Amino acid sequence: MADLPMTVRADGLPERVTIYEVGPRDGLQNEQAIVPVAVKAGFVRRLVAAGLPIVEATSFVHPRWVPQLADAAELMTELGYEGRDLPVLVPNERGLDRALELGLRHVAIFGSATETFANKNLNRTFDEQFAMFEPTVSRARGAGLDVRAYVSMCFGDPWEGAVAIEQVVAAGTRLLDLGAGQLSLGDTIGVATAAHVTALVAAFADAGVGTDRLAMHFHDTYGQALANTYSALQAGITTFDASAGGLGGCPYAKSATGNLATEDLVWMLTGLGIEHGVDLDAMVATSTWMAAQLGRPSPSAVVRALGGAG
Ligand code: HMG
Ligand code: MG
């Protein structure tokens, strides 16, 4: 299958995109079983070796809230120097302190577009979340760190239902105003559809936030992630979050399932002739290996089609 998919370029799409891999973090935070640190380190190393330019490694959140990632410090210590440039989630100053102690250089805060999810995921009201992030971002920036911000529930919320586009833009611009460099728009429960993506990107543009500062973070719960990605490409987005083998979810949003699979994204980008720098065979081998570690097949259509369901 080395010469497939055939490459047929479409007008008006970007020449290259950056894939921001979230498998070790978004993928493994939602696994029932606790994955051993050595396996996590092996997973991260394989992803880097497959050509992924950014691999989000873990989260410095409260270990009781996400026991699956309670070994964050051990993992980053195990990765040593090669882990320094991998981003990690930090919700607050305590998480930042833990990342700084290890000499890490890239952190990501994660806010919510809705009141209910701010409460469930961060134990804060909508407004209180910004009060928690403000000193976190200013201290991170002061220490020379690069800060990404996520905003969750951008396309719908399992408790509140529809989420107004203006509300998402308001939350996102508040996170950027704190000093975050990039904003990743999270479809936490996978309910986005293609024109909704176009409308949200346009609303950010109207608010002065261009596509160079935005990333898209699609979960594939309703099978829309690739269609939404294509729509975002047409709107000029060039950074896409994805998870090896389609692992993923959020322990505080039960209706969240796996992220857009990195392999599915790579297949589509290759067909479109968009540069991404990722070795698909190495990805499929990695997800097949990880599926064997987790004891269940990968949900990625491309991993399955290429014979590596695990
Ligand atoms: P809290 O209970 O309100 O914390 O939790 P607190 O500030 O009241 O502190 C209570 C105690 O926890 C204190 O200890 C703190 O030191 C300690 P004590 O003084 O009582 O001994 N503590 C910590 N310990 C270790 N690391 C920390 C930390 N912070 C406080 N960072 C908190 C608030 C934010 C910590 C909690 O709600 C939490 O950890 N939430 C994380 C939830 C999470 O990780 N969710 C999944 C990631 S988000 C996601 O998946 C969505 C995304 O993929 C995008 C999308 O799909 O939309 C990004
Ligand atoms: Mg997510």
Image (cartoon, rainbow, N blue to C red):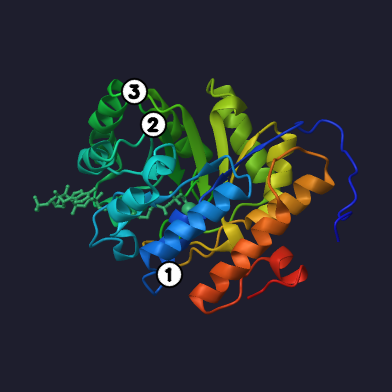
The residue that label 1 is drawn on is 31
Q: Is residue 310 left or right of residue 143?
A: right
Q: Nearer the viewer, residue 248 or 80?
A: 80
The residue to which callout 2 is attached is 175
Amino acid at dot 2:
Leu
Task: Say which amino acid is labelled 1.
Answer: Glu
Count of marks overlaid on the render: 3
The foreground one among 132 and 54 is 54
Q: Mark 2 and mark 1: span between their CA atoms?
A: 29 Å
Name the residue at 74% across, 72% down: 307
Residue 184 or residue 307, whichever sits in front: 307
Q: Earlier in the sequence, mark 2 or mark 1?
A: 1
Compared to residue 30, the image places residue 184 above or below, namely above
Distance, label 3 to label 1, CA atoms, is 33 Å
Above or below, comparing residue 47 to residue 140 in the picture: below
Which label was assigned to residue 144? 3
Asked whether the viewer can see residue 169, the reply is: yes
Identity of the residue drawn at 65% across and 34% down: 237
- The residues bearing labels 3 and 2 have C-alpha atoms spaced at a distance of 18 Å
Residue positioned most to the bottom: 295
